[in-house]
Image (cartoon, grey):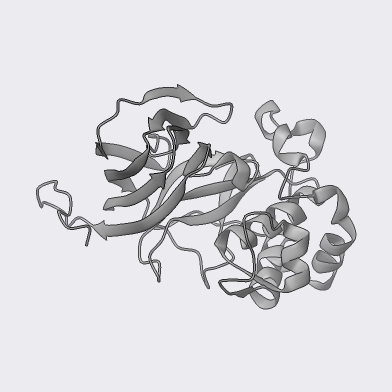
Amino acid sequence: MRLLAGCELIVESNENCAVVAMLRPRSGEAQWLISETYAFDPHVRPTEFVDVFGNLCQRFVVPNGRMRIRAELEVETERDIAIAPWAAPAPAILLPDHTLQYLLPSRYCPSDRAFDKAQAIVDAATPRSGQVGAIVEWIRAQIAYRYGVSDASTDALETMDAGAGVCRDCAHVGITLCRSLRIPARMVVGYLYGLEPMDLHAWFEAYLDGRWYTFDPTQSAPRGGRIVVAYGRDAADVAFLTNYGWLTTLEMQVWVGERPVGSPSSFPVDGN
């Protein structure tokens, strides 16, 4: 399926504020970036680098005052996603080098303190569920999707204690529990077609049976129509905007729509 997606932000700073953004998705096995446009008002010319996770990062300065940042994308992606929650994880000695960093505890995913909880969850599940499947089912049953419970400092253990959070919190819980069982898991952020209410979205991937699989505890069933913008250990690695100075977001609008087969490529003019 082909998706037209994008976002527009209005930010404000009381100084010239250095910013690193993640606006540009990469083409890969599950998605192909067909076209992209970006606008900055007032105009700036970002420089770009690739971070240690392979994400495309744009570095620029938000001048004193307000700035409008707009990104528009056309991406071909999978309507359905592969699922294998029952697949067995590989022993650590057989894992590829690039997955090992996703076994370690990180800022929002203190997996070194979650083994007992993770083991209890998988022990209580049916064998057919598999370890990651059992974790996802537990999150859906035990973590309510609720705004206002967490903030930018909330980690996975705090989310489990609160029993509620938003998409990034649910992803952190899944990652933490997987890693505590020596299953590589990583954070993913991007766009999800049909998400209600529409927003930038977060989920996680676990490495099983020689490949990465998508898991999204906030959705009742596996769903495709995803555009991946960035991967990382947790939310600290995949922030849409990282500011090195005072900066506040005044407005944000996100949209994702499907482009009908055979129709000319175009982007929504008004963001709808």
Q: Quadrant of the C terminus?
A: bottom left
The location of residue 177, given as percent across then percent down, is 76, 56
226 up-or-down from 167: above or below: above
> Measuring 77% from the left and 39% from the top, which residue is drawn there?
104
Q: Is residue 64 visible?
A: yes
Q: Is residue 38 left or right of residue 175?
A: left
Which quadrant holds residue 101? top right
Q: Nearer the viewer, residue 152 or 73?
A: 152
All told, the count of numbered labels is: 0
The location of residue 214, given as percent across then percent down, is 55, 53
Considering every residue shown, the one lying at the far right of the view is 116
Which quadrant holds residue 102? top right
Q: Nearer the viewer, residue 31 or 232?
A: 232
The location of residue 174, given as percent across then percent down, is 68, 58
242 up-or-down from 227: above or below: above
Q: Is residue 126 visible?
A: no
Q: Is residue 73 left or right of residue 22?
A: left
The location of residue 45, given as percent across then percent down, is 30, 25
> Measuring 57% from the left and 66% from the top, which residue is drawn there?
166
Which quadrant holds residue 73? top left
Q: Nearer the viewer, residue 119 or 160?
A: 160
> Measuring 24% from the left and 58% from the top, which residue is drawn there?
258
